[in-house]
Image: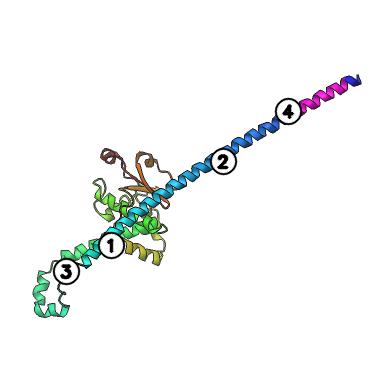
């Protein structure tokens, strides 16, 4: 009887050891699988980061080439023949009849100046509220999207019209800051001044096509339903940019930002 008990105990111990060993092997297999998954995820994240850096470098290179061309053009203009100096104001007043000048003055020029000032302010507002915390290239990209929309026949043909399109409706605004109360907050004087300066420079011709013909963009922490229907063009800072894949799609697509 004692011999039988000893044999039974030995068999139980062997079974327990076998189960324990199998459990350890299972845990090792699970740990190996988890480690492999983590390594794969890390490799994928590193690949995405590398691709993002490559895209950013390409955009910066495009901007550098554009600015270099603008600088060369400016130098060529400065090296050109000098124009005669303009007459002083007092000489103009002495030589001309002030009453006749006033009567013949084209006051539409004042209206045009006001329109230009309004357009500059609207562009500055888009830059400030949408990208004031972005690097300068990200701010240029937002301005580029606004101007791309102005040039697109499915959108309003003015900067203010594009920026404030749908702002009369809580859910219809194209740029969220125009209807979510952001404009009621106090302005940062420094960042607003920078936005105005950049808007003026863009309207004066310092425009870089860094968004690559984009008409839409969104922050990288959201995924709007329309993003899947458009073609990605660039990722700059915290924004992802898109364009219409074709004119036919553009005509049928909603204008949602």
Extreme residue in the right direction: 2
Q: Could you give the CA–CA distance between mark 3 and mark 1, rounded to whole angstroms?
A: 18 Å
Residue 227 in the image: x percent, y percent? Answer: 38, 42
Task: Tell me which numbered mark, 3 or 4, is placed earlier along the sequence.
Answer: 4
Residue 174 disc label: none
The span shown in magenta is 4-20
Q: Could you give the CA–CA distance between mark 1 and mark 4, rounded to whole angstroms?
A: 77 Å
Q: What residue lies at 42% left-to-right and 43% top-to-bottom?
A: 223
Task: Tell me which numbered mark, 1 or 4, is placed earlier along the sequence.
Answer: 4
Tell me where residue 254 sits by quadrant.
top left
SS category of the residue bearing label 1: helix
Q: What residue did someone put label 4 on?
A: 19
Residue 81 disc label: 3
SS category of the residue bearing label 3: loop
Residue 10 in the image: x percent, y percent? Answer: 83, 25
Residue 71 disc label: 1
Label 4 near label 1: C-beta < 8 Å?
no
Tell me where residue 19 sits by quadrant.
top right
Task: Sort mark 1 into few (<14), some (14-19) or many (20+) by Cα contacts within 10 Å.
Answer: few
Q: Is residue 112 left or right of residue 249?
A: left
Q: Could you give the CA–CA distance between mark 4 and mark 2, rounded to whole angstroms?
A: 28 Å
């Amino acid at each position: 009887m004692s011999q039988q008990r000893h044999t039974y105990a030995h068999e139980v111990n062997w079974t327990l050891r076998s189960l324990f060993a199998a459990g350890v092997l299972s845990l090792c297999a699970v740990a190996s699988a988890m480690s492999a998954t983590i390594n794969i995820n890390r490799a994928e994240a590193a690949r995405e980061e590398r691709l993002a850096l490559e895209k950013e470098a390409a955009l910066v290179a495009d901007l550098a080439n554009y600015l270099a061309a603008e600088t060369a053009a400016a130098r060529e203009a400065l090296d050109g023949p000098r124009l005669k100096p303009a007459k002083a104001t007092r000489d103009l007043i002495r030589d001309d009849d002030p009453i006749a000048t006033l009567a013949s003055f084209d006051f539409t020029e004042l209206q045009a100046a006001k329109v230009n000032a309004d357009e500059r302010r609207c562009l500055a507002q888009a830059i400030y509220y949408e990208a004031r915390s972005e690097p300068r290239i990200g701010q240029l990209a937002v301005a580029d999207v606004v101007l791309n929309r102005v040039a697109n026949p499915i959108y309003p043909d003015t900067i203010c019209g594009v920026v404030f399109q749908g702002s009369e409706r809580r859910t219809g605004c194209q740029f969220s800051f125009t209807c979510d109360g952001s404009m009621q907050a106090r302005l940062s004087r420094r960042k607003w001044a920078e936005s105005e300066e950049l808007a003026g420079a863009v309207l004066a011709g310092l425009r870089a096509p860094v968004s690559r013909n984009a008409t839409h963009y969104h922050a990288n922490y959201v995924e709007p339903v329309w993003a899947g229907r458009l073609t990605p063009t660039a990722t700059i800072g915290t924004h992802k940019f898109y364009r219409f894949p074709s004119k036919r799609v553009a005509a049928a697509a909603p204008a949602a930002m």
